Image (spheres, rainbow, N blue to C red):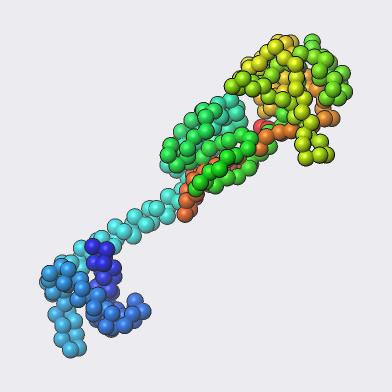
Amino acid sequence: MTDAFNDIPAFVAAVEANGFAAAARRLNLSRSAVGKAIARLELRLGVRLFHRTTRHQTLTEDGMAYFEHCLRAMEELGAGKARLEAGRQAIGGRLRVSMPVLFGRLCIAPVLTRLAASHPDLELELQFSDRIVDLIEDGIDLSIRMGALGPGVGLMTRRIAREQMVICCAPSVVAAGTVKSVEDLSAYPAIVYSRNGRAQSWLFPTEQAAPLEHVPRSRLKFDDLEAMADAAAAGHGLAWLPLWLVRDRIRAGGLVRLLDAQPTLGFDIHVLWPQLPYTPARVRAALDALIAEVPVFVSE
């Protein structure tokens, strides 16, 4: 069947050019190659498509009927190609994005919902989950991931921002500026992020390769950042939290930021998407929006 399709352009060209020789020039083939292609097509169809003389070729009745079908088929193929090309340019269709629950709700969803509002043909499907999804198997267009990336086959990646971490607490616990060094942190109770029995240390960059690690003393260990921020605002201790989560509380005075002059290590934020021969317009538009807007949420 594939070989039959390969011979159709020679047949159509011979009809349109009114001869095998003219068709050969149009297709940059020899006259013999055009004649053989049409002969193969006739053999497969079991009909004669041309009346042949030594000087002319004219369509048979079967040839005329088949030519009309070929034209309609080629028009449909052309329309299909044009539709695909238009789809690559138009920002529309379904966009499925996976993201961590809290970061996605506060920093990613606002960006993408504004994008959808600007493009009425864009259908947005946001999935909030802290598990690592398989983009190919789950049919995900984009995935947002925090921290180090593991191996990913058939995926493209782009770092879109770096999460900034801050140490903060309620004003009743310690006044801003009172803590002068990392060593001073040990004098105060802490609220620590912990998952699967492992508490997270607080990390500070140094001139050496290894960061300075502070292990806070704590009776409060949570696996939810928002609950940690609530506990810190209620005066239960110091917390090491992302700026995007506590910025508004700091501005409102509910939390104070400690060690302003001592930066803490942050975590890279990446967007991943399946590697394809071309990137659909909806995915490109989402990438552009995330690259432009997410840094505003995570930095000063």
Q: Is residue 249 left or right of residue 30?
A: right
Q: Is residue 270 above or below residue 101?
A: below
- Residue 44 x %, y %: 17, 68
State which quadrant residue 198 falls in.
top right
Examine the rendered structure and indicate whether residue 270 appears above or below residue 231: below
Name the residue at the front extreme: 197
Residue at the far bottom in the pictured view? 54
- Taking the spot 82% from the left edge, 27% from the top edge, the residue there is 260
User: Quarter of the image containing the C terminus?
Assistant: top right
- When asked about the image quadrant of residue 77, the answer is bottom left
Can residue 300 be spotted in the picture? Answer: no
Residue 6 position within the rendered picture, expressed as x and y whole percent measured from the top left: 28, 68
Relative depth, front residue between 295 and 184: 184
State the count of labels. Answer: 0
In the picture shown, does residue 19 fall above or below 134? below
The N terminus is located in which quarter? bottom left
Q: Position of residue 287 (x, y in %)?
A: 56, 43
Residue 285 relative to residue 180: left or right: left
Residue at the spot 52% in from the left edge and 29% down from the top edge: 131
The residue at the point 38 percent across, 56 percent down is: 82
Q: In this orientation, which residue lies closer to the viewer: 237 or 172? A: 237
Q: Position of residue 167 (x, y in %)?
A: 76, 23
Residue 144 shows in this picture: yes
Q: Is residue 108 left or right of residue 1?
A: right
Q: Residue at x 53, y 37 (%)?
A: 143
Q: Is residue 240 left or right of residue 50?
A: right
